[in-house]
Amino acid sequence: MASMISYINENFSRHIMTIEDPIEFIYVDKKSLINQREIGYDTLSFADALRHVVRQSPDVILIGEMRDQDTMMTAISAAQTGHLVLTTLHTSDVSRTLDRMVNYFPDHLKSQIRQELGLSLEGIVCMRLLSRQDGAGRIPALELLRQTSSVRKALLDGELWRLKELMQKGREFGMQTFNQSLLALYQQEIISFEEALRNSSNPDEFKLNAKGMYTGADSIGIYQTT
């Protein structure tokens, strides 16, 4: 998240507001103006801070963690009124991230929230840090979902099960599943087979992929590393 804010700060003239618990990185204004708020010091909660932040004409809002229904609803409203909203959730992959976002709400509101996400969600990045087999630290495997007309339709129709297929087929849009990312890292000999298997959401599918066998919509989206 810090790298995203730093990128915007270095390249664009924007008003950025962050809400964090605690503040972990102090930004220095470059092209952008950045105001940071800390829970328990500047404000009582994420939801309370967010309601006040949107009145201060920010272009970008960073919410350190999405913890409850109130914060989620306020964040969606902010996104729908033209703000770029960045946040984090403690989940394992794209599917579980969307499940968590929807499940913050009672059953009678879930369909509405899927509709809201279909109109406002720009993308999801999920990361798992893996051990390099050369011992030179760690490297991320990434699952990437980006907003496209097909992704939007799946969300609006409540067909979240289609998203895996769309990620598998969506290399041209910058999308990929964890298994595709893991396979690329394994084929480039950056990680071991065992490390890839340990971090796969579907180990049986990964074993087939590693042998050059694919099922259904599987296609390889390469995540190039440097």
Image (tube, rainbow, N blue to C red):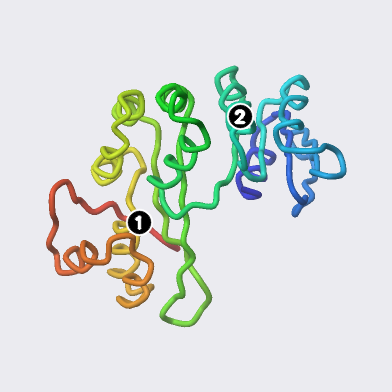
Which amino acid is tagged 2? Answer: Ala
Q: Are marks 1 and 2 in contact (CB under 8 Å)?
A: no
Q: Quadrant of the C terminus?
A: bottom left
Which numbered marker is on residue 7? none
Q: Which residue is mark 2?
A: 75
Residue beneath the point at 59% across and 38% down: 86
Residue beneath the point at 73% across and 45% down: 20
- Up the image or down, 163 lies above or below 83; here it is below
Which amino acid is tagged 1? Answer: Phe
Q: Quadrant of residue 71?
A: top right
Q: Nearer the viewer, residue 185 or 149?
A: 149
Q: Could you say whether the residue bearing mark 2 is in a helix, strand or loop?
A: helix
Which numbered marker is on residue 178? 1
Q: Nearer the viewer, residue 149 or 31?
A: 149
Point out the residue furthest to the top here.
81
Residue beneath the point at 66% across and 38% down: 62
Asked if residue 124 lies left or right of residue 85, the reply is: left
Question: Residue 78: where, in percent of width, then height?
Answer: 62, 23
